[in-house]
Amino acid sequence: MKISKSFIPIAFSLAIMPAIPVKAHPIDCAILLCMAGGFPASTECTAAKIEVIRRITPLPVEPPLQLWRCPMKLDASIAAKIGVSMVLGSDGLNAETRAIRDGIEIYHIQQYRHKRGGDSEYIIDRTTVGKYLQNGHFQWAAASYQHGPAWLAEAAGGYTVARSIGCDDDRRPVYGRTCVPTVISTTNDHNGFIRGVFMRYRDTDGTYHIEAIRY
């Protein structure tokens, strides 16, 4: 299993956990380590990724990373040597571990459809987004595919549309002169039907990875 240098602080914080029975050792510790490394090829990371895919496969859709199941303990002297923050937030995590968790973006699109016919059109957009709160809890909130991030459209096989809104030119109209748009609005769209779960996460090297589960 290849581990980047920026990933070492997280690996150390898990490696010195107090010994616990193997059957009680949660897979979320492995998910954290493997996700931080971009799920490199190994038996452990393959099992961890399979569990993540199972969790985000409907229904229900579960939090992909459940750190409350992964006990972590780090000695202050060791933390100082390897440069790991000992400052813990209300979620009980240090900055390095929290960055991995907060780098996860997950959207559940129950239904998206943009129908056009003649002079009429309508959009059905039933989307929720999963969020980790400051205390470490996970919750779903109302969201929108149409007004979501551009990566979501790419992952779902859709596209983005840029529209100009308004002008900042208040001079009197002159034929042949166009005004400058004040706002560029970018939205997502799709020519067909979308239903699925789409997750993006960032490893410690800053590389983004996307998982898409259609159903």
Image: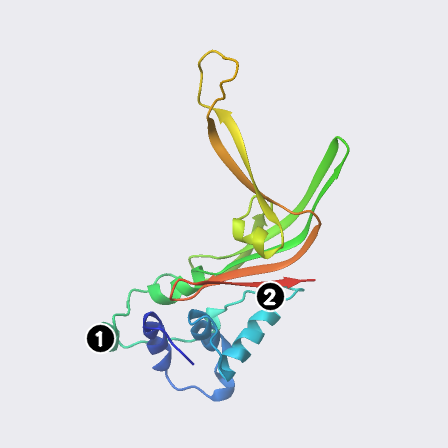
Q: Which mark is residue 56?
A: 2
Q: Is residue 83 left or right of residue 97?
A: left
Q: Which mark is residue 174?
A: none
Residue 69's x, y, as percent?
Answer: 48, 73
Q: Is residue 19 above or below residue 167?
A: below
Q: Earlier in the sequence, mark 2 or mark 1?
A: 2
Q: Is residue 33 above or below residue 209?
A: below
Alpha carbon separation for disc pair 2 and 1? 37 Å
How crowded pointer 2 is (Cα within 10 Å; few <14, some 14-19, many 20+) is rated as many
Residue type for callout 2: Ile
Residue picked out by circle 1: 81
Residue type for callout 1: Lys
Q: Is residue 190 left or right of residue 43?
A: right
Mark 2, secondary structure of its residue: loop
Mark 1, secondary structure of its residue: helix
Q: Is residue 18 above or below residue 138?
A: below
Q: Looking at the image, can residue 62 be seen? A: yes
